[in-house]
Amino acid sequence: MKNIDSALHTTGRSMYIDDLPVPEGCLHAAVFPSPIAHGKIKKLDIESARKAPGVIAVFTADDIPGQNQIGGIVQDEPLLAEGEVDFNGQPIAFVVAETREAAYEALRLIAVDIEPLPVVVCPREAAKKGMFIVPPRIFNLGNVDSVWRDAPHIIEGRADCEGQEHLYLETQGAFAVPKEDGAILITSSTQGPTAVQRTTAQVLGIPMHRIEVNVQRLGGGFGGKEDQATPWAVMPALASHILKRPVKLVLNRMEDMRMTGKRHPYSADYKIALSSDLKILGYEATFYQNAGAAADLSPAVLGRSLFHAGGSYYIPNVRATGFCCKTHLPPNTAFRGFGGPQAMYVIEAAICAAAERLKVDAAEIQRRNLLKEGDEFPYGMRVKNSEAVRCFSLCEERFGYKDARARVKAFNDQNAQFKKGLALMPVCFGISFTNTPYNQASALAHVYSDGSVAVSTGAVEMGQGVNTKILQVAAHVLSINPDRIKVESTNTTRAANTSATAASSGADLNGGAAALACRSILSRLLELAAELSGGPAEIKDEEIYSAGKKTGLTWKSLVHEALQRRISLSAQAQYATPGLSYDKSREKGTPFAYHVVGTAMIEATVDCLRGRYEIDSVQVVHDFGQSMNKIVDLGQAEGGIAQGIGWMTMEELMFDPNGKLLSNALSTYKVPDIYSTPKTFEVEFLSDSLNPAGIFNSKAVGEPPFMYGIGAYFALRDAIRAFTSTEKLPIHSPMTPERTLMALYAK
Amino acid sequence: MTSIQFILNDKSVDTDASPTMVLLDFIRERQGLKGTTSACREGDCGACSVMLGELKDGDLKYRTITSCLLPLGDVHGLHVVTVEGINQEVLTPVQQAISDCGGTQCGFCTPGFVVSLTNFLHRESDLTLEKGRENISGNICRCTGYRSIERAVEKMCQDFGGRILGATNRLEELVKIKVLPEYFLTIASRLNSIPKAGYQTKDGAVAVGGGTDLYVQKHDAMLKASPAFVIRDESLREMKLGEKELVLGAAVSMEDMNSNSTLRGIFPALPDAFKLIASLPIREQATIGGNLINASPIGDLTNIFLALNADIVLGVGGAERRMPLKNFYLGYKKLDRKPEEILRRIIVPVPAKSARFNFEKVSKRTHLDIASVNSGCLIDIKDGVVVSASISAGGVGPIPMLLQKTSAGLCGRKPSSAAAIEAAKTAMSEIAPISDARGAAEYKKLLLKQLIYAHFLNLFPSEVSFSDLKAA
């Protein structure tokens, strides 16, 4: 089944925030951001803006009836700056006017006097100054200190990776409509409707039940709308609450890029010990995470880095330390992979550095240390149903790694100007929110008297196809025609206390809940059918069977009969991932329901004259479990890989030393275009993989493929290595043409 | 200016809306057509792509443009097609292919792809994946990684390519196979009945070319500006390609220049250069004069014309003056131009048959990105010796530069690795790059050196060797 929204999308009939009809009298908001990254607010003058034509009101921290607080994990972030600003672009005030133009005109009339304070943009500098958001966190396995003395090979070094702008095509936005008796309806482009609801309630000082949040769909999220859609919904809600008028706020691209957080840049130190037969004996990594100006989701992101510190490898002795460093950048946030990519980049950097030192192929080290059944992760969980070795071997065989190596070498021997490079990139990614309580979801299913079905869950559709999968679940469980089923918008009055649609878990959790709700209705109906037909009944393709024979009853007639007998045709159900537990004091437990694995082979060609390059091919064997939807899953894999390659190659966020974003538009921040697509791009579905822990034996797919993109960095480095004999090449991504050329000609 | 008249999908529009308002806002806000989405307002993402139909010598031709940068005044007398104007009772073959191949995920960019690919089937004489890629090279999708969209292009070419290319009347064929709705057959005659707007370049008005730089940099100011739509001034769109001089009107579009067979004959390197410079929609919209007036130190066309030793003609009313392009740039974004003067023509001397031209550009993203450094190079050889050379360099100083010392130093020399190395060395004394979002100063220096090497390797492959250059 293809994405159920594809007909709407291709005809332009899908509605995003800025497309929805606004209620009569809707006002428009525009945000006044801090012009500098750090300072004390001496004076804020909004009087002229307030008097400007078309302006209804200007809101500052003083106008907040509840708490001026939007922090999630840590309550450390105001909605509107008060006393101090901590990043360039931080909202200080917002204008509400009759038109968008009037609101923007009035922004120019706001004057703010800020006394500058020192700006820190580097996480290592922040660490030196003791600027931490939360205390450091350490994962331990074995005793890494005992390894260093006797290990035959010890390689240590530093690896840096930069951030990444989400660049969801639909910018952040929401609108709020006042309802009777102080209630508010918020329509938001958020991955976390409950976060919007809870935070709005807190800021307005009213109970959550007064706030209804509705989400139709997102024009892309990628994690950027998990926590950070919230302020742009709370602001119009606040204005609407006070003015009793509908208010809309949609950021333009430059505002969005400037004011919202991104993927975290990391600076890391690594130390790796290998035996003479290339077994990894020990690994130590210290991550300096650039969290930005507030906690946001950074502690959780850092946690996942620690969970994935060892990558796809079994390492008996590990110590991974994470520092959550506070800087004066916009608060960095969730982004596909959620800290996993940074950690995997660092362990691959360590392996790459070791291979270069020992003059062996990095694939040799990778292959000998892959996770096997029963191996222990640093967090105490053991590998189960492991497919890591099978994926790696299949990738090597299917795509001919050995031959490719020889071909690349022959090419490099014959070519002076162009050099090819090759890398294998195994991925192992844990599925579940690492904060165990988040691993629950609810669904509400209604069967209407005409036999049509509506299913609501907490899942937010943002292009990943979760609604398509939920519809498949309902159609499968009920055994009815999918055309009878509608997946409803995500709404806090139908699905309460939801977790954000994140952590690749949307289909597992919400599909699980939808299955339970549908089963519950179906069991009532089949009980009735049994009564009517005199024996146990079942449904197949809308026909009711008893003892293997058609009863003459159909889905529709059974629904009609149930209604006559006053049998409920609605059900609400909750799904909670079984078997999860985690002890944070010991950093041990079972945080994940299962792991997703696979291996990519990536080849690149570098033009050593110009420093330009092409990613020639990406070939992947990936474990999708029993894919529920191959079109959707393939799309997730391909899209994730392209985004991962973008992070590692051309996507370069640039801040000046004062914390001002320089790459603040699509003209200065480049994401992959169609010409960047590798000429050969193959994703093979691992066959015969079962996953009882996933919905219908499938595996979560949103994030894991992203990390194959890391292979692009190491393939490029491999090519550069074939050109230059320089010993010291920093490991620093993204590998832009600039870094490439500088590396090629480094002295 | 009186009212603006055009056809929007199947509907005739006659509006008093401001001519400097961009088409995107008119479509979405005034007409309530929300299928065209807005994502960057810089012409960089293609989400707002629309087809623009124009009668040219009685033929109805469509180009794809980004409506976020096109002033409404520019669409007078044209046919504007949004996704709503393509939609029919069932999905069109383009929509069906995208849908079947999983070419849409979040959907926000999808209408732009549908518009670009619909026009691809209408305009191209070659319906292949490669041509399809070129037609969507200005469309950004953040979800799919493009593979599924490529599969959709392959599918539509396979299923319909033969029929479309074999048709005697392509428009009728596209209507028959429901790529386009039936009303398209009425457009040509309807456009004919729209009165000419009588465009003039009024003195003192802000000259608007394609808007592709102007609206990126000064969107808000433009809303209040008094415009002169030079792009519709026929006298500024002429190309006179003589034996000694090539005269190009300032409002000639990049794509008109790119697709001109005479120019391609003289400069075989042009198509590859243009592919690096801009996406097809931007090439169709942007004027060559606009690139010179923008005065960016890194203007791609500027650096090409500098290397070609072009002159420019500025005019106001009946008065005109001609000067070498290299003298036009006085300082960062400072031009030798009075406010009322309009750039009218660019005059390129036809190089000797023995001359060779090359253009180099490196940017963060290989295609459709602003250069870190770019360079044009024209070298003429007689009896194995350089008789004239001109090498330009962008991104290495406050203005686009003709490297005069470097160029002069080459004269009288044989093209060789040693000459290239020396030219690069001389170039270093002529430039003063700064560190910015396009790269660090050190990088730009190294890059210019490499690009000068690249000129020599491209133009004199048997006389210059990469290994010698590397050793330097």
Image: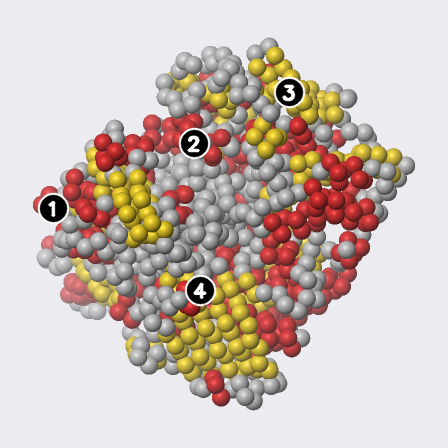
Image point (63%, 57%), residue name:
A742
Disc 4 residue type (three-letter): Glu
Residue sitting nearer the eye, B65 or A686: B65
* Residue B336 in the figure: left or right of residue B30: right
* Quadrant in the picture for the N terminus of chain A: bottom left
Q: Are marks 3 and 2 on the same chain?
A: yes
Instruction: Tell me, for residue A182, which label it has, or none.
Output: 1
Instruction: Tell me, for residue B219, which label it has, or none.
Output: 2
Q: Residues within 10 Å of mark 3 (few under 14, many from 20)?
A: some
* Secondary structure beneath label 4: helix
- In the depicted structure, whether residue A230 falls above or below residue A355: above
* Secondary structure beneath label 2: helix
Disc 3 residue type (three-letter): Val
Alpha carbons under labels 1 and 4: distance apart: 47 Å
First along the sequence among labels 3 and 2: 2
Pointer 3 with pointer 4, Cβ within 8 A: no
Image point (60%, 10%), residue name:
B318
> The residue marked by circle 2 belongs to what chain?
B
